[in-house]
Image (tube, helix red, strand yellow):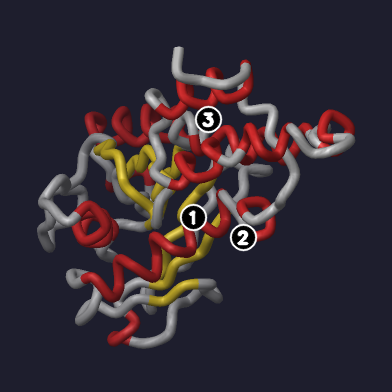
Amino acid sequence: PEASDEIEARALDVISRASSPLAVELLLDQPRRWREPRAHESARDTQRELILSRLLRPPLVVGIGATNIGKSTLLNAMAGASVAIVANEPGTTRDHVGVLLDARGLVVRYLDTPGLRAAAREVPDVEQAAIAASLEAARHADLLLLLTDSHAPAIIPPGLDGIPTLVVGLRGDLGPPLTAAEVHVSRLHVEGAEGASVVLEAIRRRLLPDDVLSDPRPWRFW
């Protein structure tokens, strides 16, 4: 009832349900943007709308990599809490672990999957079933985090081609990763804010690029 027009009413309604903090300022500015001349013409950009919709409904990010390279340690660092089991024994994560993460103002659903092994015969049946279930969920991902270190290359399982990826090098203090990484963290830093911050910032920029976020055009957020 306090809204001065329909756009403002819609914006206030969506703000109450938006998942990401970055959505608030953008939505509050929509009434002004829609009052600009030719606003309806400049707003028509389907790809931009799809990207901005991630501010309202958390996109899915799936971490994929070999066993025992620090995937769960990375998740715990990003979450700021122990949400995944960490141990030296391969196969500790025998199911996918999901958590909501704040990636620098963009809230994402993060799925930590069981580690992939080179030889299927080494994998117990229960673990194979868990891997299959997590990879099925990964088919719906908005972004795949391909995790690598000095002992294990980044892996893209069959059926996941075409999904955007971000290659993250883990345990950098043990040596350079086998796959060229876009983001690097070391075992010494991954448990602190420094390592987690770098990865979260990279996730946000890949899913919500700066040029889209700063685009001055109105947004058909409804």
Q: Quadrant of residue 66?
A: bottom left
Q: Quadrant of the C terminus?
A: top right
Query: The residue under label 1 is which amino acid type?
Result: Arg
Query: The residue under label 3 is which amino acid type?
Result: His
Check disc 1 and report the residue beneath it.
204
Between disc 3 and disc 2, the foreground one is: 2
From mark 2 to mark 1, how far is it between C-alphas?
Answer: 9 Å
Q: Is mark 2 on a helix, strand or loop?
A: helix
Please tell me which residue is depicted at 75% across the width and 44% down the height of the picture.
217
Q: Nearer the viewer, residue 147 or 150?
A: 147
Please tell me which residue is depicted at 44% across the width and 34% down the height of the picture.
58
For this orientation, the residue located farthest to the top is: 1
Between disc 2 and disc 1, the foreground one is: 2
| Residue 34 left/right relative to 214 | right
Asked if disc 3 and disc 2 are in contact, CB closer than 8 Å, the reply is no
- Total tally of numbered discs in the picture: 3
- Residue 190: % across, % down: 24, 72
